[in-house]
Amino acid sequence: MFDEYVEHAGTSEVTRRMVPQLEDQGFEPDDPSLAFQTEPESMLTSLETGYFSAGAAELDNNPLFVLGRVQVDIPGSLVAFAIASDMLYMGCSNDLLIHINLKNPEKIVKIPVKAPIYRLFLDPSGRHLVIATSQGDNLYLCSQWREFLPRPIKSFKMIIESIAWNSAFLLSSIGASATGTREILIGGRNGILYEAVLDSKEEIFKSHDRNVNSVFTLPERQPITGLCFQWFPTPENRRGLVIVSTATRIYQFVGAPGDRRSDDGARMFTSLFSAYKGSELKFLELPGSEHSELHTQFARDKTQIASVAWLTGQGIYHGTINYSPSNSTNDALIDSAQLVPYPSPVVPASPAFSVRSNTKQPNVTMEVPVSVGLTEFHFLTLFNDCLRTINKLDSKVDFEEIIPLKPTERIMGLSSDPVNKTYWAYTDSSLFELTTKNESRDVWQIYMRRGEHDTALDYAQVSSFLTFYFDD
């Protein structure tokens, strides 16, 4: 993905023809159906790598991941980033929105926003983008509009910290042809949850936002930094799950959805949250972090959330979602939860990204990531000078790479494409793509050590498996 603009780690220097970059001022958007006809060529140079493997080095010395710098001109400082279904957006400090359709990456669209961009929220289909500003005047952009310019959503007058989309609908065949998003949840800085619907239909004198109303207020009124929801997959079990996180707490809300009065999905959450109003809420509380995030990972069919990960001050709180009918009366659906500690820093932790450890060594600090992410088998942890991956199965670091930063360059965050499984890191002036290279290569060894031989065989390459088995 995006290979024509990426400097790959671990590759020799190769000189190729550069592709000219085209600019567009906000009209005639990219056709999302475009595909590569020929692969453009570019300059590829090596990045300094700090890779090390947790095992099987004698069998395969290639890294599990490759981190490459994307060769793209970013005007101003990069403040926000979002990607889904190959639709990439960057928000810059000079109030400019940059759009790149990765199926047609030589065309770069630059759109003036005329407001300070705070965050970007992109639905998994890549069609609907909410541009949150630091002033609370938010904008909406649809990739299918002929006039490719963001438009104000006046009822979204708030500072938005998080948005949860109806992913199952938006990625369905029905959702692909619909103009509306159906129900979405919005988490505000004021600790209030809002329900809304966005409609991209271009009608005169008609706003694109529908049925915006507040559905719940958190008791501590802290910013809602993470948010997701999922309707249960079985029709006979008409329930929904909403997971909400702040810097220090994670909540689970479970209940029946409202009756769907129309296809736009309006008023689906009022009844779900009504059972919790005035009652004492259950929550998990952990030491917070300056960079609080909640991430989800979809099942292979991309219709339901399989697991969640919450960035806290003590580690990554991670668990799977239990949709079993036997769990129908439970309000806590995060199952097999564990707190995965962050890896020890290679260099002394920066005070801005560290917390005091609760170990017997009082002077030891634990470095807290700036951002985290999820792949099939790994947690991605982005620190202020490097990226490390932690294997989900044994909680060990099996990849690390120092990020070559300029003296004034600052790490910003991680983002991933939930549909195409691409992973990105960005600073205030650079963009990197993390490419997976046989990520499951060493998984079979872990299953072998656990005695789960059948599962190990599912992932093992024959030559590696035989070498491991007979050497032991």
Image (cartoon, rainbow, N blue to C red):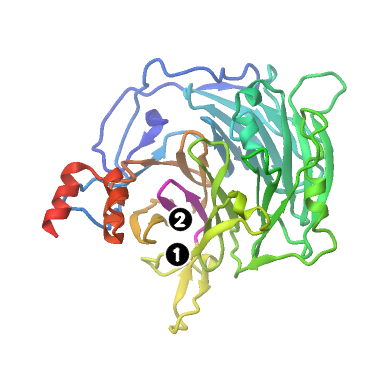
SS category of the residue bearing label 1: loop
Q: Is residue 245 above or below residue 13?
A: below
What crowding class fits label 1: few (fewer than 14 Cα within 10 Å), some (14-19), or many (20 or more)?
Answer: many
Which quarter of the image is occupied by the N terminus?
top left
Q: Give me the residue at 60% from left, 53% from top.
A: 326
Q: Is residue 134 left or right of residue 86?
A: right
Residue 381 numbered tag: 2
Q: Is residue 178 left or right of residue 343?
A: right
Residue type at the position of mark 2: Thr
Residue 123: quadrant of the picture: top right
Q: Position of residue 449 (x, y in %)?
A: 27, 60
SS category of the residue bearing label 2: strand
Residue 375 colored in magenta in the image? yes
Q: Are the residues flagged by discs 2 and 1 in contact, CB closer than 8 Å?
A: yes
Q: Give me the residue at 48% from left, 21% from top.
A: 104
Q: Give me the residue at 11% from left, 57% from top.
A: 471
Residue 342 numbered tag: 1
Q: Is residue 331 above or below residue 271?
A: below
- C-alpha distance separating marks 2 and 1: 8 Å
> Which mark is first along the chain, 1 or 2?
1
Residue 124 numbered tag: none
Q: Position of residue 138 (x, y in %)?
A: 75, 39
Residue type at the position of mark 1: Tyr
Which residue is more in the foreground, 225 or 258? 258
Magenta-highlighted residues: 369-384
Residue 265: quadrant of the picture: top right
Which quarter of the image is occupied by the C terminus?
bottom left
Q: Is residue 317 visible?
A: no
Q: Position of residue 431 (x, y in %)?
A: 47, 41
Q: Is residue 32 above or below residue 184?
A: above
